[in-house]
Image (cartoon, grey):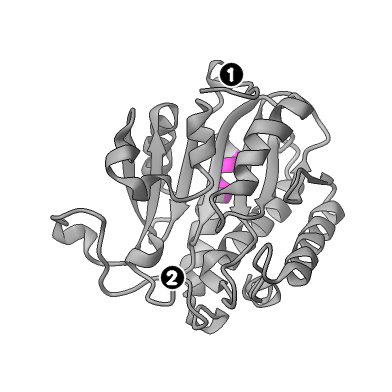
Amino acid sequence: MRATVERYAVPRHVFAERRANQRVADGLARELDELGFSVELRGRFRNVVALPRGSGPLTLVAAHYDSVPGCPGADDNASGLAALLECAKDLARQPSAEHVGFVAFNAEEDGLLGSRDFVESTVPELGLVIENVHVLEMVGFRAQRQSLPLPFVPERFASGDYLGLLAKGAGNQEVDQVARSSSVPDLRVVGAKTWGPLHRFLPDLARSDHFPFWQAGMGAVCWTDTGNFRNSNYHRPSDTPATLDYAFLRAVTELLCEVLRNGAVSDPSSAVRASPGTP
């Protein structure tokens, strides 16, 4: 996983560093293709879409592969890419993994353009039925202290050593099930369950690629180390591979792999088929 972070932690903004951005997308597509997934670069922003060979409702694992200009983006978001690829390797060896697909979004740093295009265009074009989505957004950093976008933070949340899970509506039961998992006992998990238009009052809830899925009525969970509330290297040239906590990244990945193997949410009634204009 460290090697994966080092391979993809290069400045790769969708417009400012177009060639590097394209090389990263091509590299991800090649790695996922070699694992046996059906891989395409889809949409206006070259999202890397890797689907299982089977059919039926899907669980998706997603992470964005772009960075802000001039930033290596090791935590944001080469850490998410490393976890995604490691889970893809693990699932490729599991006969029960025919329901899991992987997507690397582009242009997250520019208004979630890639994930919006995926939800609005690619999902209906391919006729995908999405059961649930796990979005990996910065999952490789721990710190002694951190803040939160609230005026009062309980002391148990002030230590930056936990994985944060953020969900809304249908995705809230996923948070409960992941948080109850005992597969990685050394990893502390904190879940934030939301409903309705709460993001209008707390806009930080809508800052990553889970949000277009929320808008389309799909259950999506954002997995995060809380980003700029913990990591002082956020969107800076200092966001390099040497700053990450690889034991933490490994623990997060082990938990996600366990969730995917067991199919944390497998109720077909929760699946949503999106179409353009879905509210």
Q: Pointer 1: residues within 10 angstroms few (<14), some, or many (20+)?
A: few
Indicate which disc residue 141 carries.
Answer: 2
Residue at 79% x, 54% y: name it. 32
Compare residues 128 and 112 and report the one nearer the observer. Answer: 112
- Mark 1 or 2, closer to the camera: 2
Q: Residue 37: x, y in percent?
A: 82, 45
Q: Provide the major secondary structure of the magenta segment.
A: helix
Q: Residue 46: x, y in percent?
A: 76, 51
Q: Which residue is mark 1?
A: 268
Can residue 187 be seen here? The reply is yes
Can residue 219 be seen here? The reply is no
Residue at 65% x, 78% y: name it. 6
Q: Amino acid at mark 2?
A: Phe
Question: Judging from the image, what secondary structure is the residue with disc 2 in?
Answer: loop
Indicate which disc residue 123 carries.
Answer: none
Q: Earlier in the sequence, mark 1 or mark 2?
A: 2
Image position of 176 (left or right of 251): left
Q: Pointer 2: residues within 10 angstroms few (<14), some, or many (20+)?
A: many
Q: How many marks?
A: 2
Segment tinted magenta in the rendering: 257-261
Quick check: 125 above or below 254?
above
> The N terminus appears in which quarter of the rendering?
bottom right
Quadrant in the rendering for residue 192:
top left
Q: Amino acid at mark 1?
A: Pro
Q: Residue 146: x, y in percent?
A: 27, 68
